[in-house]
Amino acid sequence: MGFSSFVVQLLNGLAGASSLFLVAAGLSLIFGVTRIVNFAHGSFFMLGIYLAYSLVGALGNSLGFWPALLLAALGAGLIGAAVEMLLLRRIYKAPELFQLLATFALVLVIKDAALWIWGPEELLGPRAPGLAGSVGILGRNFPAYDLFLIVVGPVVLGALTLLLTRTRWGTLVRAATQDREMVSALGVNQAWLFTAVFALGALLAGLGGALQLPREPATLEMDLNTIGAAFVVVVVGGMGSIPGAYAAALLIAEIKAVCIWLGVVELFGYSVSFSKLTLVVEFLVMAVVLVVRPWGLMGKPQATSRNVGLPEAPLRHPGTWFKVGGVLLMALLVLLPWLTADSPYLSVLAIDLMIAALFAASLHFIMGPAGMHSFGHAAYFGIGAYAAALLVRSAGLPMELTLLLAPLVAAAGAFLYGWFCVRLSGVYLAMLTLAFAQITWAICYQWDGFTGGSNGLTGVWPAEWLSDKTHYYYLTLALVTAGVLLLRRVLFSPFGYALRAGRDSALRADAIGIDVKRMQWVAFIIAGGFAGLGGALFAFSKGSISPESLAVGKSVDGLVMVLLGGLQTLSGPVVGAVTFTWLHDTVARNTDYWRAMLGGIILLLVLLFPQGIAGSIKHAVEHWREGRKPRSPSNAASPVSASKEAA
């Protein structure tokens, strides 16, 4: 660990910071103007490196390398403009989380498009002409291309600063960041401004990807791996702040470089591996920054978004037809093992559907009535699953007792994380939940001696009397039904109404004596406990558990379920969970390009059912009932009023 190696690692961090800054700058621009949390931004980064690979092959490496990188970035920008005009322009009036659902569907479509065009193999590009060698620094060789990347970051930062401060277009962008409605009222063509900003953001992401061609191979996993880091940089730097994004990229990249340089260090007689922290260091930084300064290093407190979607009607107890439908559904679920005796797989699928429904209902409990958006709800699902596995394997407890204790362990995790999370709101709250979830994932992924590391834990089977899958099916049915009904019952209690009051108007709720933060904290704990129950049922159903159960993808699946079903209805998460899980299973078993088909179906559902499936059905039924009501004489128009309307 000499000084020269330390300097080289710092330079490596600077090179990585430049590429990360390009992606984060585009994401920050898009969010600042359109207020879209663009989950597909990492896909443009992936497209940039794939397009660069193909263009370098077509134009030749000697003379065509540098033009190919620029053309690849331009191609990503044009694709971004097309996406904005054809899809996103249609859903700008939708709630922000619904827009996130649409961009998640885009991730699936773009990923399978890349798979179809370039195949599943890793594609390694050639070295950059003129910068293929290395430079001696303090007796060590350092790639010349990485020195070029170190310069790119400040150059792009300077160009963006000039563009945003010295041009009329930049003035409009900054004005739209502060007040989009006022910019539109002044006669600015808001649609084309949004398109230009989205195209520029996609171009920057594509340029960041293209510049990685000589450094790393192009893979299909680059989209989600990149978007997580980019979100962290944007939030740490400050939403909408380009200089903040550069400062955050530098900070995170250099901390990672120092961790790599330190390696394994002896502290107080224990070996501490700092190099393992590179998997989670950005989320640790984000958690600290959000707790200390919620709006980021160089950001400003964001005003509450005006794009909140339709107002929610008061909670109503289920009507007669809803109760009849529920009874018929329960009867069908009870008879399902006999109806599908020839196909045991359907019982297994039904167990997965029920567990997904409980997970989605627990997430909806804090997202809908409480108004707390969570990007890391899988943490509590995974904590419950790992708690169940460890209590059975290590502590030797019976499975029945484990099903009681595992949700309590998950609720304890929600107790700890929720204390910090409920002090934030909006995107900052969502990103802090993501940070805690990733920290939990990293612990499970790297603690080989306790959690099994990346391999997870196996041999987690239910009790002997539940070895028959039919018996386990009925246990799952009973616990999931009880869990969903309990969550529903809580929402109709005084606590549930107080929770909604805090969501709709925190100031008014506080004025009448409601401790809003404490209510939200309790809701966080309740939701974490029921998610943990779902995780425990999942572990015993599969016989094993792995870190994937806590990963970002699992949390995103929960978000998709809730939003697909409808955030404003209590039955929405169940409908969305069943729909998404069934579609995922059916489509994945029938085509190699299941992601694109699933993403296309989600996009279609987003456009057809802007309030979610259950929400749109509820709205249609209420509209039909209103149309069937006879008009009372008092509501009928008088001749005088009719003549006035005619006039």
Image (cartoon, rainbow, N blue to C red):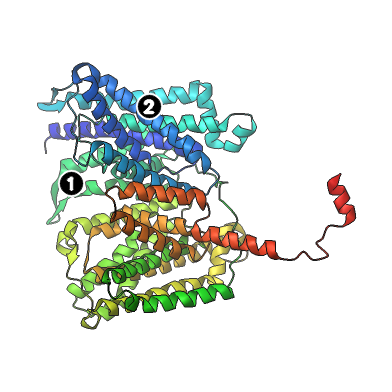
**Residue marked by disc 2:** 157
Tell me if residue 466 can be seen: yes
Label ID, residue 212: none
Q: Nearer the viewer, residue 8 or 353?
A: 353
- The residue depicted at 28 percent of the width and 60 percent of the height is 549
Q: Residue 385 at what x, y percent from top left?
A: 28, 67
- The residue depicted at 27 percent of the width and 36 percent of the height is 117
User: In this image, 387 relative to 611: left or right?
Assistant: left
Q: Residue furthest left?
A: 139
Kind of residue indicated by mark 2: Leu
Q: Nearer the viewer, residue 379 or 214?
A: 214
Q: Residue furthest top?
A: 63
Tell me if residue 97 can be seen: no
Q: Residue 191 at what x, y percent from top left?
A: 54, 33
Q: Residue 112 at what x, y percent from top left?
A: 30, 43
State the separation of the CA atoms marked 1 and 2.
30 Å
**Residue marked by disc 1:** 275
The quadrant in which residue 257 appears is top left
Kind of residue indicated by mark 1: Ser
> What element does badge 2 sit on?
helix
- Which quarter of the rendered picture does the C terminus lie within? top right
Q: Is residue 288 above or below residue 622?
A: above
- The residue depicted at 55 percent of the width and 36 percent of the height is 178
> What element does badge 1 sit on?
helix
Q: Nearer the viewer, residue 458 or 448?
A: 458
- Which quarter of the rendered picture does the N terminus lie within? top left
- The residue depicted at 13 percent of the width and 48 percent of the height is 264
